[in-house]
Image (tube, rainbow, N blue to C red):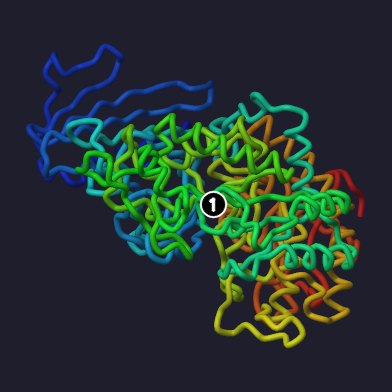
Amino acid sequence: MKIYNNEGIPIVNALLGTTINYDKVLPCLPADQRNDGSICLEWMDRARLYLNFIQLETDVKCYTLQWTALSENIAPTDCFDMTNNHWYGGGQTAESAWPLEKSEHDFQPFITGRTEKHGWGNVLKRYFISSKGVAIIVDNKTPLYVSISGSGKQFCIRAQYDDFAFVNRFTPMPQLNYSMCTSYNMSDLHEKLSEHTLWDGLKKEDTNIIDSLLTEPVWEITSDNKNYLTEETIYNFTDDITNSVLKQGHVLINEFWQDQVGDFELDLNRFPTLEKTMEMLKRRGFRVVFTIQPFISTESFNFAEAVRKRLLVSERFSDRSIPALTRYKTLQSAGVLDITNEKTVRWLIDKLKKVMEKYKFDAFYLDMGIAYNMPHYYQCEKPLLNPDQYKTLFTNSLQGSIPLFGVNSAIQRPKAPSFIVLPEFESSWEGLGKVIPTILTYGIIGYPFLIPGAVGGDYESPDTSTNGNANKMLPDPELYTRWLQLSAFLPVVRYHNLPSAYGDKNISDMAISLAITRQTKVTPRLKRFARVSLNLGLPIIRPLWMLDSEDPSCHTVMDEFSIGDELIVAPILHSGRRQREVYLPAGVWKDGIDGSLRKGNRWLHDYRVEENEIAYFERMPDDTRF
């Protein structure tokens, strides 16, 4: 199948029905045809295809395709040529590929996972867009598998049932339903297809929460050992923040505020006077967020009650009285709350409201894991399309009843003001290099409100160094510095390690200097383009091709980004580097380092960036005189 633009140039070259292996195609029997204008074709006893055309807008044309397998041996599969064009979207890949042709993986179920093991990351959307102005949107009910072959220059979509991701059969045979939409350029098409209803139901206090996250840091207390997290830990950590002269912001406390995960009650042994500590934190200007998970440890005092009341996801083929168990992080054995059960939702909300009313903290953070954290033989009271639908139901069930700070995994954008948290990145230069392509991808697939990983990385790599004063592992100082510079221009700045932990005045001074730059240059733009996101669904952090989608050089830049269309950021992402290549799209740009004016639509070769600097460029009026 080929689709041409108005100039007669092919913009789609697709191979349809690649698994049918049968050339003879016939019109469908009258009983199988539809009265919606669609063309119906059938490959005898193999597959049936419905093809239709919709003029979505004056310059947006959409073709809908619906494949139905007619045999157990057929998994409807369509493939798209990636030669001479670039594709984006879907989600984070193992290579953090930008564009997608830099990726390479065989067919995998399109569900959330760990990229290094499962092919796809923690946030997904069935949306792909190409540099030739073509978008593919796959229906949520399709049991979707995706493959990408950068070397073979094609990516393929497939409908296929299995025994985990798509175990619940809502149709007798798998159906591959999707739309291909085209327009005259990629940027215009993306804007037309973006979700435009983000304001719906939003209150003034919701926009205030968004603004607070854009302007104030997130301070996260992390540990794999619950005994490390105590009232004293919180007090000392926030005391260090106050003494550092940085903004107070949000204190994120992990799941170890409980004795056992799933207690949904405070551990009074480690937090005997938390009510007073919370009052102190409020006076200092902190907001406090508690982490919750949909898991109940078998060691929790709530587990027996949850089993008795049948509040947990059950083992498939059982009578629903046997809970299906899983592991997650430090949990060796846990049940999963069945959020499709109304009794479970009421039970959970009641417990969360009680603990929130008693300790007066500000919000909850939902740590839901990935699809593969669901028990393999899971069974809910109401069948799920796939294990990721659980996340959407869990988030929607709680929103409106309790305040939500953010979620760590999604296949559907949570209602604002909840933010999406990026996956964890290793504390290494490779980890730093994955931040920008991941943020760009998540923005393109419809998630504008993002919380990046921690400055310096989220978990240790073999080359981390030890700081004796802190008595814990700290990221390499140069790595931390470059990560700090990048984070100053992202929607939210998130810390595990305070700059002062290094005992280096240069790092502390840089953190303060970057905070001033953020306050004057970055935050006003973040707030302004957050409003644009709420109106138009467009990302706050944008790829260069959104500034000029006709410029081929913009299509492959993966180490720069733009805040809206006003400020381009080009950080140093490699150890020991003091220069880099920078591309500026068309226009006039003011250099943030030396204040000079520069014409766009060209490369700046060997652009000098010292260790205490980050390259950024502000858009100036096009008629600006040099």
The three-letter amino acid code for the residue at tag 1 is Asp
Residue occupying the point 53% across, 21% down: 58
Q: Quadrant of the C terminus?
A: bottom right
Q: Quadrant of residue 387?
A: top left
Say whether residue 464 is left or right of residue 45. right
Within 10 Å of disc 1 (Cα), the crowding (few <14, some 14-19, many 20+) is: some
Does residue 157 appear in the picture of this structure?
A: yes
Does residue 11 appear in the picture of this structure?
A: no
Q: Position of residue 608 (x, y in %)?
A: 79, 75
Q: Position of residue 461 (x, y in %)?
A: 56, 79
State whether residue 454 is above or below residue 460: above
Label 1 sits on a secondary structure element that is loop
Question: Which residue position holds label 1?
Answer: 367
In the image, 595 versus 177, the foreground residue is 177
Q: Quadrant of residue 382?
A: top left
Q: Quadrant of the N terminus?
A: top left
In the image, 380 versus 300, the foreground residue is 300
| Residue found at the far top of this picture | 35
Residue occupying the point 87% across, 44% down: 623
Say whether residue 241 is left or right of residue 409. right
In the image, 13 versus 306, the foreground residue is 306
State whether residue 349 is above or below residue 123: above
Q: Position of residue 600 (x, y in %)?
A: 75, 55
State whether residue 205 is above or below residue 410: above
